[in-house]
Image: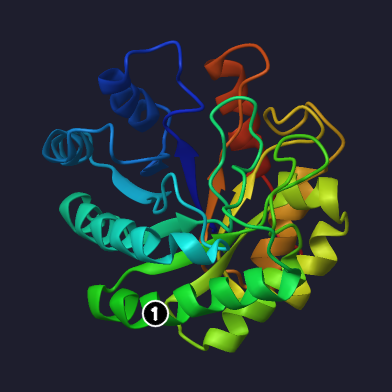
Amino acid sequence: MLKRDIHIESIYSELPFEERFAAAKKDGFDHVEMWGWEDKDLPQLKKLLDDNGLKLAAMSGDGPYSMCDPANKEVYLEYIQRSIEAAKIVDCPVLVIHSDALEEWPQFAKPMSGDYSYETRICAMFDVLKTIAPWAEEAGITFVLEALNIEKDHCGNFLATTKTAVDLVAAVGSPNIKVLYDAYHMYLNEGKICETTEKYLPYIGHLHIADAPGRHEPGTGVINFKSFVQHLDKLGYKGSVGFEFYPQTDTPTAVKAVKECFEYALVK
């Protein structure tokens, strides 16, 4: 059976943050994930996880800086070092990173400090990834590089395709630098989510699910996630499947839809 986790910030929003952990556990989840760590009391977060028998599957590893902006290199790397230390406190094995920092609202990529070419941005990202790879290996943490959709949510984001993310990860050549494949984002940009995950499976270290086009729970859009989850299981995917979406109506309805994704019998 695939490992699954549920996003503690986009889901359970009806509850105070401290009460969401018990709710997730009651709903049958052993793993949760979240966005940034800077606004959290990390020792208290670890206690909430431990008290409820939960593990943190992933959290954001980059902040208000762009990896693809050469002028941000020093501050970006400083933030990564802080993220590694934060991950150690809460025992988080996976840190999510992106090409660009995003404006809070609307979710556009923050402007670059200069008018850089495509090649310059790619080289800046490779330089950063190559630098943080040994840090990740030493800490026992995996960084997962996420491409985002530019059709609906993240206009101006530089990294927009799975192939580019994989090319960067492959060039770095570290087992601790992988790709986060977000089925929602990549359905909007590329389609072919089954074919793409099969093609690039060795490079995928984490996976996100939300239905398209609304970014709600499975069954509210056009993607057949029951078949997609079965497809991942048949491929032998070993990473976690994270449900990161905004409930269309309420959390109980959304959680029921998540569980239904895993109610299948594999054809032997």
Q: Which residue is mark 1?
A: 131
The correct choice, above or below, for 43 with respect to 168 in the image is above
Quadrant in which the C terminus is drawn: bottom right
Specify whether 239 is left or right of 85.
right
Q: Quadrant of residue 169?
A: bottom right
Name the residue rendered at 88%, 54% in the picture.
Answer: 191
Identified by mark 1, the residue type is Thr
- Give how far across and how far down residue 47 sits, in percent: 13, 37
- Helix, strand or loop status at disc 1: helix
User: Which residue occupies the foreground of this view, 215 or 69?
Assistant: 69
Quarter placement of the N terminus: bottom right
- In this rendering, does residue 268 appear at all? no
* 201 lies above or below 246: below
Total numbered labels: 1
Tell me if mark 1 has few (under 14), some (14-19) or many (20+) residues whose alpha carbon lies within 10 angstroms of its own: few
Residue sitting nearer the eye, 31 or 179: 179
Q: Position of residue 146 (x, y in %)?
A: 60, 57
**Quick one: 46 or 262, which is closer to the camera?**
46
Q: Nearer the viewer, residue 221 or 229?
A: 221
